[in-house]
Each structure stands twice: as C-alpha cells, then as structure tokens.
Image: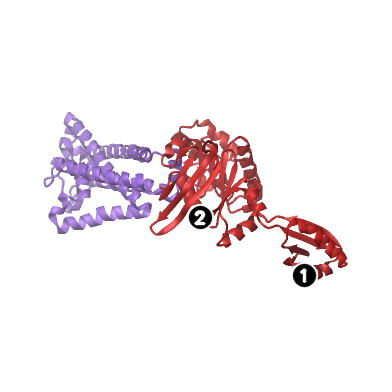
Amino acid sequence: MTSLLYLLIDRPGGNAERGTFISREILSAANGLTIGFSASAGLLGIVALCVFAAQTAQEYTYGTLRNLLVRQPSRMKILIGKLLSMSIFQLAIVLVSGAVSIAVSFALAPHAKVSTDLWSSSAAITSVLHTTINVFISAIAYGLFGMALGLLLRSPISSISIGVLWLLIVEGILGTVWSTANKWLPGSQFSNVAQGGSAEISYSYSVAATTVYLVIISIAAASLFKKRDVSN
Amino acid sequence: MSNERSLAIAVDDLSKKYGDQVALSHATFHVPLGTICGFVGPNGSGKTTTIRMLLGLISSSGGTAKILGESIAHPEKYLPRVGAMIEGPAFYPALTGKENLNVLATLGGYPLDRVDQLLHKVGLGDRGDSKYKTYSLGMKQRLGIAAALLPNPQLLILDEPTNGLDPAGIHEIRELLRSLAQDGITVFVSSHLLSEIEMISEYLVMLRDGKVIFFGKTTDLLERQRPTLVVKPEKEDDLERLRQLSEKLGHRATVSNGQLHIDAEGNWSAPFNRAAFESGITLSSIAVVLPTLEETFFEMTSNQSGGQQ
C-alpha cells in the first residue's frame, strides 16, 4: 500500500484508498512517513483476525484443547496465554510491516519527487511511535474480534469467513447506505484508531468505542470459554 | 462401599443430560487404587462422556464424583496427578512429536528431559523429531500414551489406547499397562478389544444406554455367568446322538466345530460322561468353559434386564 502512494502519485485516479489523492506536500510532512503504514492497518487487522480466529478455533478442530485443559485446568490461564502469544506474534507483524513501509517510503520518495527532509525530525519519530502503537491497538482489536468468533463457532473456516464478511462487506454496505453507522460499527472504530482519528470521528471517540467493544467481546468470550463443555 | 481413601475413582449417582437426551444416568461405580479397571460398553453408551466429566472437560447434570479423593468440581486439585488420553490422540500436526510433548510439559510444569524418556518408553525414540502429521495411527496412539504419562500419574485414564495398533503394538501396550499397575499406578482404560480388557483388567465397569450395568471384579462377572460343558466324542458320527442324549437329560446342547456345547454346570460332567458311556459313546474330551468377557458383554448389553451390581 505504501508503494502505491508514491508510484501512483501523479495518476488522475488518485494514489490512496477509494480514489482519494494524497499530495507531495502531505507526504513530505513529518507525519507523511507513516501514512502508508497507517493505511495498511486494515489489512494487518484482517490478518490479525484470521490468525487469532484460526489459532483459537483450531484447538477445537484438532481436539488439542482437551489436552491443554487436562494439563492446565485453569481455562482463563489457557485463554490469556493464547491471547498473549498471539499478541506478541501480531506485534512482530506490525513492527516488520512498519519497518518495511518506512523503508519503501524512503526508497520511493526520490523517484516520486517527495521531500524527505522532515522525515528525520523528532516530530517524524514521534509520529512513527504513535502510528505503531495505534496500528498495534487496532490489530489487537481485530484479533480479539476473531478470537471471540473462533471461540463461539469452534471452526477456523466459519469464524474467518464470518469475520471477514462482516468487516469487509456488511460494514461497507451499512456505512454506505447509512452514514451515521460508521460512528458505531466496530470495524470502523478499529480502523479509525489505526489512522489516529479522522475528520468525522475523533481519535478519542474511536479509542473509547473500541475499548467498550473489546470489554464486551472479552467478557462474552471468556464466559463462554470458561463455562462451555469441551466435547470436541 | 470401599474406604474412600482406597479409591482412585468414586462415582456416585453421576448424570449428564444434553437437553432432553440423557448421556449418563445415575452412574455409580468405584475403582480401587493400584488396579487396572476396564471400562466397556457399546458405542454411545456414555463412556467418553463419563471420562470427560472425570477430567473436568464437561460439567455434570447431577451426582458427584471424586478422583484421588478430590471432587470433580475442582479438577485443578487432582489433574496434576492424572494422565489422560481421551478419544484418541490429538496434537498439533505441524509440530514434531517431541515439540508437542514439550508444549504439554511446559504447560503442566514438568521437566522437559522427561519428554525424551517417555518417547523412548513408548517406542518413538527415533521418531520424536518427525512431524506429527507424518505419524501412522499407531505412532499417534503411542505419542498420546506418552503425553498421558507426562505427569508421572497416580491415575491413568485411557480411551481406546490400542486403536490402530498392530498385534505387536497391542501386546506392548498391554505389557506397559501391566508394568504401570505393578508400579502402583491405577489404570482406567476403555476399549472395544474385550479380549484385551479381559486379559489385563482386574476390575470392570460396564455401561449400557448411559447406565452402569456392572462394576466390580472381572472374575466375579465371569464366574456368575453360566458355564458351558464342551464335549468331544471319539467318533464325530456320535455328535448327533450325544446331542439328543443331552436334550433327553434336560440340558440344551448345540453342535459346533465338531464339539457339543452343553448348557450345564461343571458338576454335570461326570453324570453326562457316565450316561454317554452307557449309551456306547466314548468321549475323547470334556471341559467346563466359562464364557469370555466378549460373550458376557454381548449377553449383558443385548439383555435389557441385565443385572446391576
């Protein structure tokens, strides 16, 4: 996604999402370095959803959950352990993606005639830090959504397809036909956190809404996992 | 009832319902410490449901059960002393056998060097570094047994441990279970191979339609079944005459494989031998045969009025 910002910079069809145009001036600003990175947050979120959902649901389909629970009867420890390990994996993916995006930006900026003078400033470093944190929070939110689906449906294929269908299709349709829907749809909020807020929805609102969603999802998933019979 | 301290498993009035469907109904049985106890019943009789409840994987709908003196409501109190393989082995296919055991050893807080010892013990010493997905069914079973032995358990619960094993593998597992029992480990094993259960199990729990129809010593079950008198005449031509003689004396008899099988107690062998001699028939052999566990199992599980201990 980062490379498209620079390679398509002079195309009339736009160089960003949904035909929008991001100019050389915007890209050459201190926070221009991270625009490509934050734009890839949606994709990283979908990856997180798939990884979290698959890793959770596979314990049921492989039948390995019963082994885990016999060796560690505390279901909450198992759940928190899985969440932590997948979060660490997701952090690594976010860090690698950020590094690649920044490297691609530096590599393609001269070709696209974008100034990189401000990209070494302290403001740029702060922007990289903020964007990394926001993209990571967003990815974890997507991941928790996937994990909850995995626990609920106990099938990797079902949980991934329903999760992706909701985030990419259902939310897209709802957001198009009902303009205020983006203010409460979970995927929109997760995405907006990664972008650091937008003109329509503030960052603090999205963080609060995401927190509410995550608390509800976590409590529901944990209760389900703790009480439900393991018959797979 | 046995002293509770001497019991590895004490199940009292345990039930499990799924909606209107009863998977286990008021089951009561006790398994003494240090014994091998067979757990048998037709498919769908509630064996796996019972095992899952004993391991804290599913909740009960009623009744109580204790494992090694601890209630199944608190599996964390007894599971560190219990090894289990439920409904066949289940491991991560992309990991090696050793890596799979390492995951479980780490989770249970057991020393990792135990993993290599157990892989050797179950005959997987040279395949521990192969991916689980490349294992044969027999190798998967062995890995499942190794995983069950990880905690150095006081109680081993195995669900169909010989599934997929060849005769040599079955023999090895039988010997392994015997040696574990000799070391004082209680083994609770479900299997469809009733001849195997008969060979190794001192105790037996039999289920039918979610109900316990027998629990106790295996010999007690077999001895209370009616024995069969198996008689072989010197001349095979005398078989039919011999059968008629038995029927005339009031004992049902059938001819099978050149032998006469008479439904009679062992103490009837001498009178029958005498009656045959007086009729001019010489017997080459006469033996009292107790029914096998398999025969008893079929009789009990097909007989709706089968007695409960």
Q: How many marks?
A: 2
Where residue A8 sits: x, y (%)?
A: 21, 49
Where residue B134 sits: x, y (%)?
A: 53, 47
Residue type at tag 2: Lys
Q: Earlier in the sequence, mark 2 or mark 1?
A: 2
Residue A26 is tagged as none
Q: Report which colour depicts chain B.
A: red
Chain letter tied to purple: A
Q: Which quarter of the rendering shows the N terminus of chain B?
A: top right
Q: Mark 2 and mark 1: span between their CA atoms? A: 40 Å
- Say which residue label 1 marks: B248
Where residue B206 sits: x, y (%)?
A: 56, 52
Where residue A49 sits: x, y (%)?
A: 31, 47
The residue lying furthest to the top in this view is A122
Q: Residue at x 50, y 55 (%)?
A: B211
Mark 2 nearby-residue class (10 Å; few <14, some 14–19, many ≥20): many
- Say which residue label 2 marks: B211
Quick check: marks 2 and 1 in contact, CB under 8 Å? Answer: no
Callout 1: chain: B
Residue type at tag 1: Lys
Q: Residue at x 35, y 48 (%)?
A: A151
Q: In the figure, B241 relative to B300: above or below?
A: below
Q: Check disc 1 and report its element: helix, strand or loop.
A: helix
Q: In this rendered view, identify the residue nearer to me: B300 or A203.
A: B300
Q: Check disc 2 and report its element: helix, strand or loop.
A: strand
Horizontal relation, residue A76 to residue A108: left or right: right
Horizontal relation, residue A118 to residue B81: left or right: left
Mark 1 nearby-residue class (10 Å; few <14, some 14–19, many ≥20): few
Callout 2: chain: B
